[in-house]
Image (tube, rainbow, N blue to C red):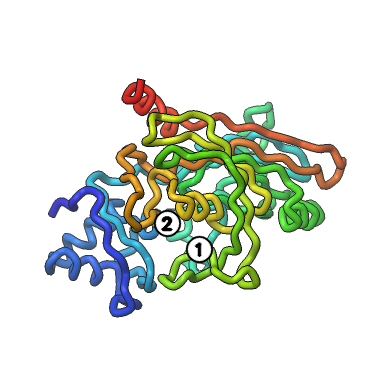
Amino acid sequence: MKPQPGTVHHVTAADRGATLAAFLRAQLGGASWSRVQKLVRSRHVLIHGNICTDPARRLKEGEVVKLLEASAPRLPGAGDVRIVHLDDEVVVVDKPPGVTTTRHHEERSWPARRRQMQPTLEELVPEAIQRQLLARGGTKKRRLAPVRAVHRIDRETSGLVAFARTVPAARILAEQFRLHTTHRRYLALVVGRARGGTIRSHLIRDRGDGRRGSGDDDEEGKLAVTHVAPVEHFGDAYTLVECHLETGRTHQIRIHMSESGHPVCGERVYFPTRRGIAKDESKAPRVMLHAAELGFVHPESGDELRFESPLPADIRQVLAALRKRFA
């Protein structure tokens, strides 16, 4: 059984609570249990853009299940996490795509073996710190305390993430992110010829189809503000944009760009369905979103820190192909 490339299936109310294996059997015309389980365990299935290797995973209404033609690449490990800044209070890392920042609530009860198979960035960072300390000339490997997440970026998003190494630092940094006093600049490749401007809306958890989105009532939801500026146009088909976050809501850039008619390339959850929206034919291997700059006030010294991350190889490759195509 070879999955059709890009095949997408939406979980309806009738499918809610079904296992992934049972759902796929129904969608694939009664394929055998062994074939469906092999498909899942060989990393051919995405749920909401995230690789799922558990055939027994229970589905929720509104989730999007996508079948991949080729097996997804391996999950990142500690060696794939680049440390940008390290001191006794704070560590800033360059997150590779394909790993969540922290563990979702329903995953916290997973047994240790399963967690090790799908580690989070938060769990990988202490080992990455250990590697750097040894590379600096450390002579003894020692157990490091866990780091504390103070903000998050999506699994498929790459770029800069800060973690606190102490409880006081976590409290101070989390407050900065809560008050939106941090500096956050993203680069995104989007569909269409995007213009500059400010997108302002109130985001709600369920816009009516089980997904996050902008509500009609300004008193409902949380204010989200994104400042968008084009960096490079590829004809009228695609635009590389920079997005400065005035707020930092869940999936804010992805939702705002989709609702403006310019979804991020590789988007599978928030791609608009209305007429007039150009198709995404960029062949993006993931959501083309990168956290390129991060700035905050150091929780102990009070110094203003700012860090930059270059575009990763997969986004550079897509951009190079578009430059060649639209030269």
Decide: few, some or many residues near mark 1? Use Cα within 10 Å; few <14, some 14-19, many ≥20: many
The residue type indicated by label 2 comes to Tyr
Q: Residue at x 41, y 33 (%)?
A: 314
Residue plotted at (18% across, 52% down): 3
Q: Of the numbered discs in the image, which one, if any, rests on residue 318?
A: none
> Would you identify the image quadrant in which residue 127 lies?
top right
Most extreme residue toward the right is: 301
- For the residue pair 119 and 186, the one nearer the viewer reads as 186
Q: Which residue is mark 1?
A: 213
Please tell me whether mark 2 sits on a helix, a strand or a loop. Answer: loop
Q: Classify residue 232 as left or right of residue 247.
A: left
Q: Secondary structure at mark 1?
A: strand
Residue at 53% over, 30% down: 231
CA neighbours of label 2 inside 10 A, class few (<14), some (14 to 19), many (20+): some
Please identify the quarter of the rendering in which residue 31 is found. Answer: bottom left
The amino acid type, in three-letter code, at marker 1 is: Gly
Q: Between residues 108 and 185, which one lies in front from this camera angle?
A: 185
Q: x, y (%) of residue 136?
A: 67, 27
Tags 1 and 2 touching, CB below 8 Å: yes
Sequence-wise, which precedes: disc 1 or disc 2? 1
Q: Quadrant of the N terminus?
A: bottom left
Residue 71 placement (x, y as % from top left) = 27, 46
Question: Residue drawn 36% across and 20% down?
Answer: 327
Up/down of 241 relative to 273, above or below:
above
C-alpha gap between disc 1 and disc 2: 9 Å
Please determine whether, in this image, residue 256 is positioned above or below residue 327: below
Q: Position of residue 65 (x, y in %)?
A: 31, 61
Residue 120 seen: no
Q: Which residue is mark 2?
A: 270
Q: Is residue 28 visible?
A: yes
Q: In the image, 191: left or right of 88?
A: left
